Amino acid sequence: MISLFNSVNEFTEYRNSLATDSIGLVPTMGNLHDGHLSLIKKSISENQYTIVTIFVNPLQFGPNEDFDKYPRTLTADVEKIKSLKIEGKEIIVLAPSSVNEIFPKNFKTTISVKDLTNTLCGASRPDHFDGVTTIVYRLFALAKASKSYFGQKDYQQVLVIRRMVEDLLIPTEVIALPINREESGLARSSRNQFLSESGRVEALELSGTILKISRLLKEKSFQEAGIEINDILEVVLRDQRWDYLEVLDAENLEAVNINTQQVVIAGALKIEETRLIDNHLTKISYAR
Ligand code: AMP
């Protein structure tokens, strides 16, 4: 069964009528693709109720970003959810009809996680993560879900949300699921549809470069791979299309140090007018 709420008050009334802990939350901005659906399917398999939120959150877009242009496809999204095997489980879609539904006019609070948000996407999108944590906190408060599902596609986002959940004692388990990719290797994204045919090919440079670094780190020690990786990073640094490409400690997004066991190789590349992000986790070893 699937039910759709456009009113937050009606949603809240329904949510409060449910006498169970078996509730999963999947926050999204809609325009659902197989990446989103993998999160929803996982939640359906683990919970009696799955709350999918569909809300394009203005707080996480910068002034010159694509908030107005962001694809809004609610009817098709609901159809995609309906086509999943729900089998005795229940899906509740919360798609607020306006920004005011979620952020009333007198809303004054910002939730901000320090340090983790200074690097990668946070460096080039200054208020982005405050927008993310503020909306996600509010969605946690509305859904009161025992489990919440996020994609590793937004690796930094997962770390920031985990930090917020731990720091603010939010009673939900954060579950992060692997990046869902097209056959070509391109990470699925609602923004991929803005790419032309040739843009889609050019975009493979993002996953391709990240994988190249990952392979080097698997074949060689961190010290040995370092020279070749630095060559790759230098080329990227000179290329205007790249916003960033970095190899950081996967646990805290700090520079790799002697305690680092796993790195995240994360990149953001602008193709045509579309900024794409991707990442890959890799365990590293050290030469003795
Ligand atoms: P969005 O609608 O882009 O805000 O994404 C909603 C959720 O889906 C976030 O937790 C994303 O990390 C996740 N997600 C987006 N794309 C993918 C993907 N290709 N694979 C797995 N999860 C994804």
Image (tube, rainbow, N blue to C red):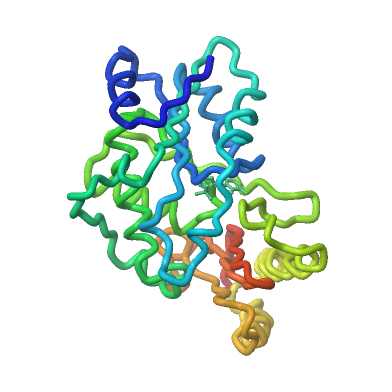
Number of marks drawn? 0
Nearest the camera: 78 or 228? 78
Where in the figure is residue 34, as x and y percent of width and height?
66, 40
The image quadrant where one finds the C terminus is bottom right
* Residue nearest the observer in this picture, 259 or 241: 241
Q: Is residue 39 above or below residue 127?
A: above
Q: Is residue 205 visible?
A: yes
Task: Tell me if I can see residue 257 in this picture.
Answer: no
Instruction: Provide residue 147's location: percent of width, then percent of height.
Output: 40, 31
Where residue 172 appears, as percent x and y from the top left, is 33, 34
Camera-side residue: 204 or 284? 204
Question: Is 67 rendered above or below residue 269?
Answer: above
Please give left or right for residue 63 compared with residue 188 in the image.
Answer: left
Side of 253 where 207 appears, left or right = right
Query: Residue at the location (59% across, 42% down)?
Result: 73
195 with respect to 75 (left or right): right
Residue at image coords 41%, 51%: 57
Question: In this image, 261 relative to 6: left or right?
Answer: right
Name the spot of residue 209 as percent of width and height, x first.
Answer: 70, 71
Q: Residue at x 58, y 66 (%)?
A: 265
